[in-house]
Image (spheres, rainbow, N blue to C red):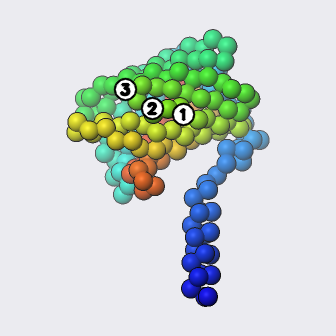
């Protein structure tokens, strides 16, 4: 009986440990993030990918441009990686209501689901990641925090089968 109770308790603790922070926690944080305003016009971002041990494997710069028409926007990202590779991602984003967004891109499986409160936005999506001629489905838990009118910080955790593969850290500057 004790073993069974211990097993149930460990399972419950394990599941609640995966719950994470809700975007609503940031409801009162300022400035209030409006992605149609922040991601409108030119932006530049700098970032890196670190593996699960924390070692930085690749760095990148992104030149971005956003255009919005009402509740729909297109965000074009042009990446230049530290190893010389260049890539592009084009996001098509739609605002559903005051707090929810959906996004699509060619290398995203299905839809990215976004939830925004206060200065924070959380995106959850599955990225189709090409590696050595194969494509892997990896899950992203992507958090953005608007710091002021010009700067936003972003931290994404990448997972496969629930195991952390690494993280991406990005700093955005509007108008740069």
Crowd class of label 1 (few under 14; some 14 to 19; many from 20; radius 10 Å): many
Tag 2 near tag 1, CB within 8 Å: yes
Q: Secondary structure at mark 3?
A: strand
Name the quarter where the N terminus is drawn: bottom right
x, y (%) of residue 123?
56, 38
Q: Which residue is mark 3?
A: 79
The mark found on residue 108 in the picture is: 2
- Residue 175 position, x and y percent, is 53, 19
Q: Nearer the viewer, residue 156 or 3?
A: 3
Please tell me which residue is depicted at 41% across the width and 44% down the height of the picture.
138
Q: Indicate the quadrant where residue 80 lies.
A: top left
Q: Residue at x 57, y 70 (%)?
A: 11
* Sooner in the amino-acid sequence: mark 2 or mark 3: 3
Q: Secondary structure at mark 1?
A: strand
Structural crowding at the residue carrying mark 2, measured as other residues with C-alpha within 10 Å and reported as few (<14), some (14–19) or many (≥20): some
Q: What residue is shown with label 1?
A: 112
Q: CA distance from mark 2 to mark 3?
A: 16 Å
Residue ranking furthest to the top:
69
Looking at the image, residue 176 sits to the left or right of residue 58; the answer is right
> Percent from the top left, x then y, of residue 19?
61, 56
Q: Is residue 64 visible?
A: no
């Amino acid at each position: 009986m004790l073993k069974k109770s211990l097993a149930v308790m460990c399972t419950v603790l394990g599941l609640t440990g995966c719950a994470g922070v809700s975007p609503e926690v940031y409801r009162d944080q300022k400035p209030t993030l409006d992605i149609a305003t922040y991601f409108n016009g030119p932006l530049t971002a700098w970032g890196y990918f670190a593996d699960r041990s924390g070692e930085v494997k690749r760095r990148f710069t992104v030149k971005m441009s956003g255009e919005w028409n009402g509740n729909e926007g297109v965000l074009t990202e042009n990446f230049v990686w530290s190893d010389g590779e260049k890539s592009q991602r084009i996001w098509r984003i739609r605002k559903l209501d005051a707090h929810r967004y959906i996004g699509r891109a060619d290398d995203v499986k299905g839809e990215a689901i976004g939830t925004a409160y206060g200065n924070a936005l959380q995106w959850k999506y599955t990225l189709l990641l090409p590696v050595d001629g194969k494509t892997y489905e990896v899950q992203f838990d992507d958090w953005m925090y608007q710091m002021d009118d010009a700067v936003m910080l972003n931290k994404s955790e990448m997972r496969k089968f629930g195991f952390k593969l690494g993280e991406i850290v990005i700093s955005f500057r509007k108008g740069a």
